[in-house]
Image (cartoon, helix red, strand yellow):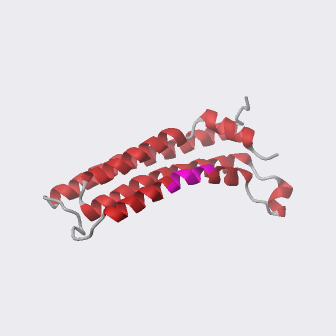
């Protein structure tokens, strides 16, 4: 098992705090959306005349594509820059792990934001809840953990 250097341990804890902050944003979205719905009761969305069926499908496909993209960006970010200057001095591992973790967390958060947009347009609470649950599930798999960072370190190009 690859041990994390001390700076990577501290960086992992910092990215975990970023992850918790992003997770708390989903709860904040739910609260704000409830307030908006209560202030505009009965809330039917800000664009009730628009048929959102196609947009729901497009957003769902976009969410799936975002989450599938995680598989492809991980090796790209871990590989780092291929420029001669960076390769010559050897880029640090920890900043790449931090970048990768935050990018993965942001993609998970983006799924919830799609639900916020649908709710504001159409006023259906189920739109937000579906995307929020998908986002939370994605967070569960992509939350920065020590073991995950150790796996990524093993996968680093030599």
* Image vertical order of residue 73 relative to residue 48, above or below: above
* Image vertical order of residue 118 relative to residue 126, above or below: below
Residue 150 image offset from top left, x and y in percent: 68, 36
Q: Quadrant of the C terminus?
A: top right
Residue 102 image offset from top left, x and y in percent: 56, 50
The residue under the point 25% across, 55% down is: 124
Furthest-right residue in this view: 88
Was residue 137 drawn as part of the magenta stretch in this picture?
no
Q: Quadrant of the N terminus?
A: top right
In front of the other: 137 or 65: 65
Residue 43 image offset from top left, x and y in percent: 17, 60
* Image vertical order of residue 117 relative to residue 4, above or below: below
The residue under the point 52% across, 51% down is: 67
The magenta-colored residue range is 65-71
Q: On the picture, is 91 further left or further right than 98? A: right
Q: On the picture, is 29 further left or further right than 47? A: right
Q: Main secondary structure of the magenta part?
A: helix
Residue 110 visible in this rendered orientation of the protein? no
The residue under the point 31% across, 53% down is: 127
Q: Give the quadrant of residue 116.
A: bottom left
Q: On the picture, is 31 further left or further right than 138? A: left
């Amino acid at each position: 098992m690859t041990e994390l250097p001390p700076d990577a341990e501290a960086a992992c804890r910092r990215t975990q705090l970023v992850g918790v902050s992003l997770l708390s944003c989903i709860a904040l979205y739910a609260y704000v959306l409830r307030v908006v719905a209560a202030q505009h009761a009965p809330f039917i969305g800000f664009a009730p005349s628009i048929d959102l069926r196609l947009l729901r499908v497009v957003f769902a496909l976009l969410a799936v594509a975002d989450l599938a993209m995680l598989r492809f960006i991980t090796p790209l970010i871990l590989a780092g820059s291929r420029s001669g200057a960076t390769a010559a001095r050897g880029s640090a591992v920890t900043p790449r792990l931090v970048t990768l973790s935050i990018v993965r967390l942001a993609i998970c958060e983006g799924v919830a934001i799609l639900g916020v947009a649908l709710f504001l347009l159409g006023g259906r609470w189920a739109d937000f809840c579906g995307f929020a649950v998908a986002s939370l599930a994605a967070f569960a798999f992509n939350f920065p953990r020590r073991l995950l960072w150790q796996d990524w370190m093993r996968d680093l190009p030599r």
